[in-house]
Amino acid sequence: MKRKLTAWAMALVMCGGVLSGLGAGEKVALAEETAAINVGALKGPTAMGMAQLLDSEDYNFTIAASPDEIVPMIVQGKMDIAAVPANLSAALYQKTEKNVSVLAVNTLGVLYLVENGDSIQSVEDLKGKTIYASGKGATPEYALNSVLTASGIDPEKDLTIEYKSEHAEVVAALAADQTAVGLLPQPFVTTALMKNENLRVALDLNDLWEASVTDGSRLVTGVVLVRNDFLKDHEADVDAFMDAYKESVEFVNNDTAAAAEIIGAHEIIDAAVAEKALPECSIVFIEGDEMETMLSGYLNTLNDQNPEIIGGQLPDEDFYYKR
């Protein structure tokens, strides 16, 4: 896809007959074409929030199933803007020698604890339980550990956490063990609830996180970042993208039915699931100082548990783009 920009050039014709029909000083319309901005997102809330942009000729979209597909494209300069997990953005800052900046937080907490029945009413009720989860060594593990520890529960002694490789395995484990609890992200929570009427959302990890912190941080699932090489030469285009993305987020949150149709058409997730899940997906667009406060606090919590998950150290001020 191309963006067509019409440029007016002044043709100063010094010798008659060189350009038939054109005199000195006449304007010639030159249709210049510049490459569309290459944008990446993951199947799930980050891509869902971009619904209104997906058919725009201004952008070439890559919708990936895994961050592993996007990272090489950013490092190699083949992708200009990308929506990625929050911790991965910090790791990329170090990996690319500070050649990426975060534009905005685009997804807050999407992790929920679900169960069969209604035995879990508070974090304290998790003691002695088995929690099935996916995301070992990633945000789900550290977010869960942080919430449990803040509530006085030792993740290694007071309960059992069994990690699975895929979300579907967590759902299957819940069906097999009626007394267990599952940690799942949206929109997989909605998919599970639609398939098993006995499941219910017991606790929202986002709410639990906010209740346990005093630094203004939030449980940040995803952010959108830009390559600094691209930003340097295309700052106006990046700002225009941010404005368009913000409008798309408002559209997605205000007209879930219409947004779900687009999401389904692009095979991000099924439209019926999307319509039910969107209100619970914590899709936002938060930039500037507020973005830095909530993201830096979140990264600091991860750093306390395992610095490697954010690239070995906390990013500095230049990591946060503020227009």
Image (spheres, rainbow, N blue to C red):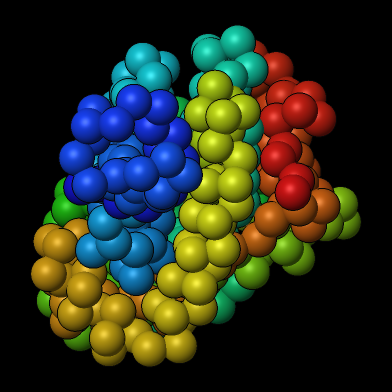
Q: Quadrant of residue 178?
A: bottom left
Q: Residue at x 17, y 53 (%)?
A: 168
Q: Is residue 286 left or right of residue 167?
A: right
Q: Is residue 181 visible?
A: no
- In percent of width and height, residue 199 lies at 28, 77
Q: Is residue 203 above or below residue 148?
A: below
Q: Quadrant of residue 125?
A: bottom right
Q: Is residue 224 above or below residue 75?
A: below
Q: Is residue 65 left or right of residue 208?
A: left
Q: Is residue 225 visible?
A: yes
Q: Residue at x 41, y 48 (%)?
A: 26
Q: Residue at x 76, y 28 (%)?
A: 318
Q: Is residue 17 above or below residue 244?
A: above
Q: Residue at x 64, y 69 (%)?
A: 207
Residue placed farthest to the front in the image?
A: 16
Q: Is 314 or 306 nearer to us in this picture? A: 314
Q: Is residue 248 above or below residue 11?
A: below
Q: Is residue 115 left or right of residue 96?
A: left
- In percent of width and height, residue 132 lies at 33, 50
Q: Is 206 or 58 nearer to us in this picture? A: 58
- In percent of width and height, residue 238 lies at 55, 46
Q: Quadrant of residue 163?
A: top left
Q: Is 70 or 133 nearer to us in this picture? A: 70
- In this figure, what is the number of numbered marks? 0
